[in-house]
Image (cartoon, rainbow, N blue to C red):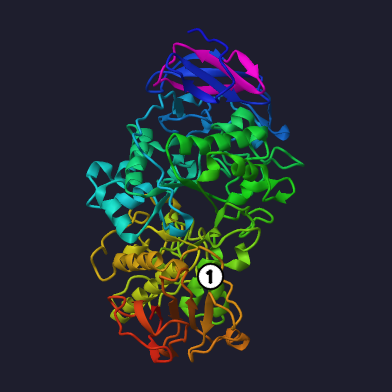
Amino acid sequence: MRIQQGTPHPLGATWDGRGTNFALFSAHAEKVELCLFDRQGRRELERIALPEHTDDIWHGYMSDVIPGQVYGYRVHGPYAPEEGHRFNPHKLLLDPYARKVAGSIVWSDAHFAYRTNSAREDLSYDRRDNARGMVKGVVIDDAFTWGDDRHPSVSWSDTIFYEAHVKGLTIGRDDVPPAWRGSFRGLAAPGVIHHLKRLGVTSLELLPIQYFPDDRYLVEKSLRNYWGYNTLGFFCPEPRYDHEDALSALKSTVSQLHNAGIEVILDVVYNHTAEGNHLGPTLSFKGIDNRSYYWLTSDNPRYYENFTGTGNALNLTHPRVLQMVMDSLRYWVEHCHVDGFRFDLATTLGRRADGFDPQAGFFTAVAQDPVLSRVKMIAEPWDIGLGGYQVGGFPAGWSEWNDAFRHTARLFWRGDRGQIRDLATRMTGSADKFRHNGRPPRTSINHVTVHDGFTLADLVSYTGKHNEANGEDNRDGSDENQSNNWGVEGPTDDPDILTLRRRIRKNLLATLFLAQGVPLLLAGDEVNNSQGGNNNTYCQDNETGWVSWEALGTEEDLTGLVAQLTALRRTYPQLQPHHWLNGGAPDQDRDSIWFTPEGREMEEDDWSFAEARFLAYVIAPLSADSAPVFIVMNAADMPIDFTLPQWNGVAGWVQRFTTAEDNGSGKERLAPGESSSADARSVSVFAGAE
């Protein structure tokens, strides 16, 4: 087979209708060999040295190579770990730009560049060929007929996120065709879309779908990498979600969700890769150009900076690494039509040698990018490195997961003392965290539960974690859950405890959806999904980690309650994150006022009362044709009498929602100054009437 010089761009394997151009970045390589395999990826047919080297890009063009060709790379260079170099041409490497993969990793010591039984550890050198058990890239034809598909472009003020796992969401639903359960196509099944629309969800946020292997230590324990936070292929959809053609299945699913007005948000992991630390395997980046791709310790580049807790961290200060991330993000928007991204451990993406910088190259590149600057960008604003907690520290245009909201909401409804001041701040967008540099209230992504931690059902059923099934003697997962079992650890038949747990679940959901900021609901929380007290189901690809839909249609099903709450947000736009509330002086038009149970405006002594568990406030309407909203939250274990407030233009207050009644609303009209009672541990919403 003849190879021509080709071009250094685009990177990856690109079919142009006549042949395929191959281009691979490596600044320190001495030679790059393209390895072609049979269609099954079992037998290596040819090794061809890429003939050209332009600006650190190795490239070549082959007119004989068509879509379906299986390939990998062998990269030659120094093996000098103490200098940061780990080249070993005996190891077949996955193309970082591969759009499709063939096979999977069959774990053996051959995947390590060093002799795993050597006393010298990674300073030794291994000559075994790993190709037979190595995942490989596949050349593809990326054509797809999108028709008139359009991004829903849901405004931030209207956005409701629903965090879900592709398999976990659909594997247990009877209304999904059996062949689609657990796959991309299952997400667009009519029953799933109907459920999302009923909830009021606008944006489906998917746990990682970029290609990730099952870690060796999990496989050896008969477990799997279920969540997927260990990416190896940033351009390739995970084949386990459709073994025949994952890319086409994903595109079709995105198109159908768009037709229903639902956005698709991807949870992406650009902070680290699946190659681990200095003792990890050599699968791609480590063998292509270790010194360029990863953060290495400055005093001894044999070792990796571990900002992520996974052993390595991608170095986005290197222009080619930054280019890879930007190319990847644009690929998912332009070729797969996704609507935004949630960035795992996003602090790492903004690190420079001296720490986190909100003006780092990655954030600057995103801000000016004509594609990425128009989609939703959401940060998990921390990592485990020095100065890693950066809630509120990201640049304008970004939204951030707000763990302070989660913490306070849980403590308040658990009945902890001294929470009302903080809860008031969280309910109004967390201005203490985000109101700076022109950032709006939608910066705060509010959540009570997410994939990492207890589900809502477990939050009210377990005081401690129960992660024994993970095989780490219950040492993994957070010990700080702010949870309460309300009398019995785990399942119970006690009707009083079950009623109380259901009430607390309702209250936490109401708190989430009534707060300004953008709400994120964890899939299954609406149907009392439990993980048996496991708060770290990353390796539980089974009924523990999957959503159980058994409670649908029972009294534990709170789907209707969530639907009421999302409808309230649409009916009363002041509940949405349009603008910051300022309160205002008593002689001015007020956009919000906080009231004591007696109906007077709260003063400093009221806020400082540690035993207070009652919070009530009015938010003014945004327009003359709307109504003010009065929200009452009582976390006490007893009813509290309160006075309906005076408000300009309001002749009466009508209850629109409460967690204390099965139907959630329906009480008679009450006059300003009239007394009522907030049931123990309840939330109520009143609307003003003329």
Name the spot of residue 221 as percent of width and height, x first: 43, 47
Q: Residues within 10 Å of mark 1 (few under 14, many from 20)?
A: many
Q: Is residue 116 visible?
A: no
Residue lying furthest top: 2
Tell me if residue 73 is in the magenta stretch: yes
Name the spot of residue 399 as percent of width and height, x first: 55, 55
Q: Is residue 420 left or right of residue 512?
A: right
Q: Is residue 414 left or right of residue 294?
A: left
Name the residue nearer the viewer: 96 or 185. Answer: 185
**Residue at image location 46% in from the left, 54% down from the top:** 155
Secondary structure of residue under mark 1: loop
Name the residue nearer the viewer: 161 or 584. Answer: 584
- In magenta, the rendered stretch is 50-76
> Does residue 145 sit above or below 225 in this rendering?
above
Report how many numbered discs are placed on residues in the image.
1
> Does residue 408 sit above or below 144 in this rendering?
below
Residue lying furthest right: 299
Q: Is residue 657 visible?
A: yes
> Does residue 329 sit above or below 42 in this rendering?
below
Viewport quadrant of the C terminus: bottom left
Name the spot of residue 326 as percent of width and height, x first: 57, 37
Name the residue nearer the viewer: 524 or 454. Answer: 524
Residue pointed to by mark 1: 428
Quarter residue 364 falls in: top right
Instruction: Please state which amino acid type lies under the numbered disc 1.
Output: Thr
> Does residue 105 sit above or below 487 in this rendering?
above
**Residue at image location 44% in from the left, 15% down from the top:** 65
**Residue at image location 71% in from the left, 50% down from the top:** 355
Tell me if residue 525 is in the magenta stretch: no
Name the spot of residue 444 as percent of width and height, x first: 54, 61
